[in-house]
Amino acid sequence: MNTIYIATNIGKDIRTRSFFRRDIENLLNHNESVTLDFSEVIFISRSVADELYNVLEDYPLVQLDNLERDVKMMYSVVERARKQPRHYDDNNIEIIKLHTLKEMDEFFSSF
């Protein structure tokens, strides 16, 4: 099994989803078992954690390893949200249609 060290190949502080996806796509192969090693990665943004979840769905042979505490926590937040989608029991919100910037300005100025 191949190991990709994220800190070395992408960075230790990863904040941008699109850059993460581009960089990880360049490192992965759909037919290869790979471990993404997050040793020394100190931060990933929520959007990067969400994209990491997408990567794991798109590449079923990819596994994660050595997620630091904060990185693991952020990924867990995304994973829980994806597995338990939000449910809105009270869905009686009034929809207001605003057609111009002036209407929007007047609407938000009324609060």
Image (cartoon, helix red, strand yellow):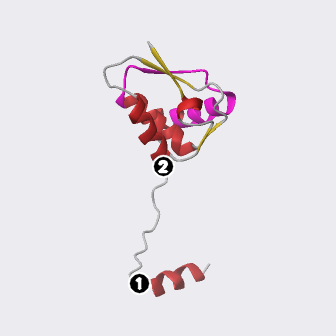
* Along the line of sight, the residue nearer the viewer: 55 or 9: 9
- At label 2, counting other C-alpha atoms closer than 10 Å, the crowd grade (few under 14, some 14-19, many 20 or more) is few
- SS type, badge 2: loop
Q: Residues at badges 2 and 1 in contact (C-beta under 8 Å)? A: no
Q: Position of residue 40 (x, y in %)?
A: 66, 28
60 or 91, which lies in front?
Answer: 60
- Examine the rendering and report whether any part of residue 86 can be seen: no
Specify whether residue 65 is painted magenta: yes
- Among the 4 quarters of the image, the one containing residue 11: top right
Residue under pointer 2: 88
Instruction: Identify the residue shown where x is 53% and y is 85%.
Output: 106
Q: Name the residue that disc number 1 marks.
A: 100
What element does badge 1 sit on?
Answer: loop
Which residues, given as a range, are shown in magenta?
A: 58-79
**Mark 2: which amino acid?**
Tyr
Near-viewer residue (71 or 83): 71
The answer to whether residue 32 is left or right of residue 16 is left
Residue flagged by tag 1: what amino acid is it?
Thr
